[in-house]
Image (tube, rainbow, N blue to C red):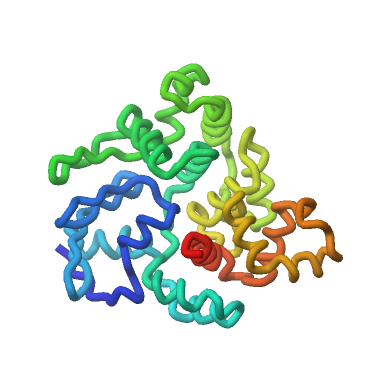
Amino acid sequence: MYHLLINREKLNIAKILKSGQVFRYEVIDGKGYILIHKLNYVFVEENKHGYVFHCSEEEFINIWYIYLDLERDYVRINQIIIDKDKRLTKVIDEFEGMRILKQDQFEMLITFIISQSKSIPQIRKLVNNLAVCYGEEIGYVYGEKIYSFPTAQHLQQLTEDDYRTMKFGYRAAYLYEAVKWSINLNKDMNSLSDIDLKQQLVSIKGVGNKVVACVMLFGYGRHNTFPIDVWMKRIMLQLYESEIRKELKNPEVKNIRDSQIESYGLKLYGETAGIAQQYLFEYGRNI
């Protein structure tokens, strides 16, 4: 077992799991957490000194250290965000230890297509059903069978009707096209610029700007992205309406597009935009 001695200001797994960026995990009441990444899983216990990872030090360093984004200096990033808007000081204090996970790119593409117009419990149920039906059983912890998320190759046999049978509704066509796109992909997406990566992803049927931004942030680690949905638009207008209207030469609020709010968020927060967006989301929930 690997003992990670770390304070909650630098890592808080409970807050990460509740942040809306990850949907495949388990919380074992009174015992700990199960984290799942590709063909790997780990049971994590929490104590007053930090966390105990039920894995070797080598596995922790090669998989979970990277997955949890522990190499990034969030203390510095948090201060940059506070310097941009001191109103976020309290929520950043409350959510210290929140990090952006480095998740599987294909899983993020499928997950955030599924997430459209769904609540977090609904998303978790649909995503987990897909893993149980088409992923691989990779372990067993406290009575919980652990499954990997299926690869594009695992899902290429499915038709649109198969997805509809699994209760994916109108997203069935989008999931079918996303799998086909992934199978036919013949380039290294990681080497693309942000602009080129966005153009590639938005070419997939049913993948709009919000889904693209989430996939870029949570799958490709592009932190200078700023996902906007109805909730984030409301928060941004509440905080920055006058600044946005001034920049856009005073349009009516009803005419302000999501893309314009996204552009303002990127301009304001720059390389820290993706992390700032997580705090803004929580700020909005608090008020």
Q: Is residue 259 above or below residue 159?
A: below
Left or right of 101? Residue 264 is right
Residue occupying the point 24% across, 63% down = 58
How many circles with numbers are drawn on the protein?
0
Given residues 128 and 167, the one toward you in this image is: 167
Left or right of 269? Residue 102 is left
Quadrant in which residue 270 is drawn: bottom right
Left or right of 157? Residue 250 is right
Residue occupying the point 64% across, 62% down = 236
* Extreme-right residue of the structure: 249
Residue occupying the point 33% across, 27% down = 133
Q: Quadrant of the N terminus?
A: bottom left
Q: Position of residue 109 (x, y in %)?
A: 51, 42
Left or right of 197? Residue 1 is left
Q: Is residue 117 above or below residue 242?
A: above
Q: Position of residue 9 (x, y in %)?
A: 35, 76
Q: Position of residue 221 (x, y in %)?
A: 51, 59
Residue occupying the point 66% across, 65% down = 266
Q: Position of residue 128 (x, y in %)?
A: 34, 36
